[in-house]
Image (cartoon, helix red, strand yellow):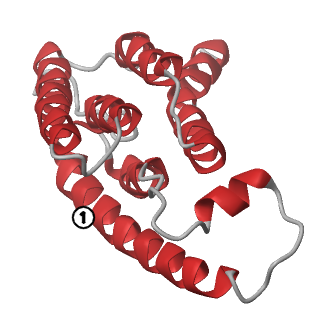
Amino acid sequence: MLLMALASFALVMVFPALVIFAAVRDATSFTIPNWISLAIVAAFLPAAALLHLPLLTVLGALGVGFAFLVAGMGMFALRWIGGGDAKLFAACGLWLGWPAAPAFLVWTAVAGGVLALALLSGRKWAGYYPGARPQWITRLVTPGGDIPYGLAIAAGALAAFPTSLLMHPPLQGL
């Protein structure tokens, strides 16, 4: 029983670990490798099975993930976010499911606004403080540069994760 509980915990913690890794990669390279989003998606079904999530709950989560994929593709087409961001957005939607989806959207929007303001401010002041700094920081504070929105997606996902169905599975038979 303890071994099963540890396995469930370890598998469920894959999501926050990979989301944090995606955020770090986006901040430092402005890319989110496909394997990260694929690993998040691939870990969902084993986690759901280990937690004995009802089939309707799993199907609902798949629906949320698909809806977020479509929304992400639209945002990508409008050039609001990058392709890696769109895939991460969909993978997070899958893991969070319906009950946590509204919180995820709100927290992602708030984090995106804070990120944009911080980068705009940092880009304004970066010219006043020239000097040696890592290349990825220079890229972040370059005026007119992109915004690594994977940071906001990760913040929204981590804020909403405690309310997700994987953290609070429904009672069996309901």
- Crowd around label 1: few <14 · some 14–19 · many ≥20 (10 Å): some
Please tell me which residue lies in front, 87 or 101: 87
Q: Quadrant of the C terminus?
A: top left
Q: Quadrant of the N terminus?
A: top right
Q: Position of residue 160 (x, y in %)?
A: 36, 54
Q: Residue 126, relative to residue 144: is it above or below?
A: below
Residue at horizontal 40 percent and vertical 40 percent from the top: 167
Q: Quadrant of residue 144?
A: bottom left
Please tell me which residue lies in front, 22 or 119: 119
> In the image, 109: left or right of 59?
right
Three-letter amino acid code at the position of disc 1: Val
Please tell me which residue lies in front, 2 or 42: 42
Q: Quadrant of residue 43?
A: top left
State the SS at label 1: helix
Counting labels gives 1
Residue at horizontal 25 percent and vertical 59 percent from the top: 103
> In the image, 6: left or right of 78?
right
Q: Residue 128, relative to residue 8: is it above or below?
A: below
Residue at horizontal 42 percent and vertical 10 percent from the top: 46
Residue at horizontal 72 percent and vertical 89 percent from the top: 128
Q: Which residue is mark 1?
A: 106
Please tell me which residue lies in front, 169 or 159: 159
Q: Quadrant of residue 72?
A: top left
Q: Position of residue 69 (x, y in %)?
A: 19, 30
> In the image, 61: left or right of 30?
left
